Image (tube, rainbow, N blue to C red):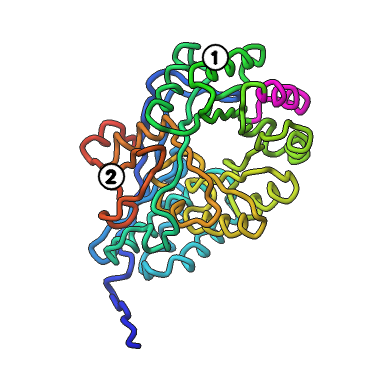
Amino acid sequence: MAMTSIRLGAEALIKKTEARVYRVPTETPESDGTLSWDATVLVLARVQAGGHTGIGYTYSAKAAADVMVEHLFPLLHGRDAFDIPAAWLAMAQALRNIGRRGIGGAALSAVDCALWDLKARMLNLPLAHLLGRKRDCVPVYGSGGFTSYSRDQLTAQLRGWVDQGLPAVKMKVGRAPREDEARVAAVRAAIGPSAGLFVDANGAYDRKQALHFASAFATQGVSWFEEPVSSDDLAGLRLVGDEGPPGMDISAGEYIYDLFEARRLIEDARIDTLQADVTRCGGISEFLRIDALCQAHCLPLSSHTAPSLHLPACASCEQIRHMEYFHDHVLIEHRLFDGAASPQDGMLAPDMSRPGLGLDLKEADARAYLLS
């Protein structure tokens, strides 16, 4: 059988890189169990080769752009754009002294996503096709329900997602524990008995609080308890999972920055569903390895935030359970990018008519939020 090879030669060499930083205010001040904010910073990476430009981004801090420019981009110039594994390894090794966790990991993640987008665009393929799509669409759940919301705001938002056909919704808890049971009960009354109800404490509870609230939330049909204690408390996560009510999954993982942190949550905390965030964990390259790790442990995987960026990878994952359709990032992605995904019947489907990630920056619209 004849084999067709693609030889682009010098055209495949990376010629130009760029980092941009955007600050997008939230609609109102927001909070969860442990943090408050009024804006989101998006750091965009651009990589060019062969007349094509790949983009990737992370939700982090402006310093992530400095890491890209100083430590990562110099390793890409003149490199074959198709050799993503070699580029990823060189970048990860370059972060040894400045730190892979945090800002460094966010920068690596954005650049890796840009490399995958670039490769797919150079081949004129949707990224989901290039990665090896395993499903046409992926279930999503609506996520927001901030602790800063009034009771009316909270119930209206989550009820709205259910009315749009999303099968489950997630709310924040933990900032005012005395109010949490009543707020959860109000949401259950608003969304009805059949919709899935998830809660996310963002590590706000201690172990005994988490056990108490797990039992209390179970009476309202809560089936997902995210970060009931800090994800650094592996023994605490294991305790809540072992002693908590049947039918309630304990999940964590949004703050993992590499495969090894994922393994610790799986093996030591023994969580029920692992979360991973392509904007933090090392990009699409590491996200796919985390999926393989979950497969080896027969564990479901769920993506954290940034739905349009996650979509091609999630459609290509073996263990994916669902994706988070996060309020803030949905607004940003639709505001700044053409091609941002919208759910149909509770599912997101990659647009197979668009190459790469399927996202194109709206330059004029994005300029209003540009920091650097």
**Amino acid type indicated by mark 1:** Ala
Rendered residue at 41%/30% (across/down): 328
Relative to 64, say whether 318 is above or below: below
Position of residue 26 measured from the top left corner of the image (x, y, whole percent):
39, 24
Instruction: Farthest residue to the front: give it.
Output: 194
**Amino acid type indicated by mark 2:** Gly
Q: Is residue 213 rendered magenta in the image? A: yes
Judge left or right: residue 9 versus residue 109: left
Position of residue 173 measured from the top left corner of the image (x, y, whole percent):
60, 22
Q: CA distance from mark 2 to mark 1?
A: 35 Å
Position of residue 323 measured from the top left corner of the image (x, y, whole percent):
48, 42
**What kind of element bears circle 2?**
loop
> Is the stretch drawn in magenta largely helix, strand or loop?
helix
Q: Is residue 354 rendered magenta in the image? A: no
- Reading the image, the residue beneath label 1 is 186
- Reading the image, the residue beneath label 2 is 339
Q: Which mark is residue 233?
A: none
**Closer to the camera, 299 or 114?**
299
**What kind of element bears circle 1?**
helix
**Closer to the camera, 152 or 261?**
152
Which badge, 2 or 1, comes first in the chain's sequence?
1
Relative to 58, say whether 10 is above or below: below
Position of residue 20 measured from the top left corner of the image (x, y, whole percent):
34, 43
Relative to 231, say whether 89 is above or below: below
Give the magenta-colored segment's residue range: 203-218
**Closer to the camera, 236 or 186?**
186
Quick one: quadrant of the C terminus? top left
**Residue 248 in sight from this viewpoint:** yes
Rendered residue at 46%/11% (across/down): 152
Rendered residue at 30%/51% (across/down): 351
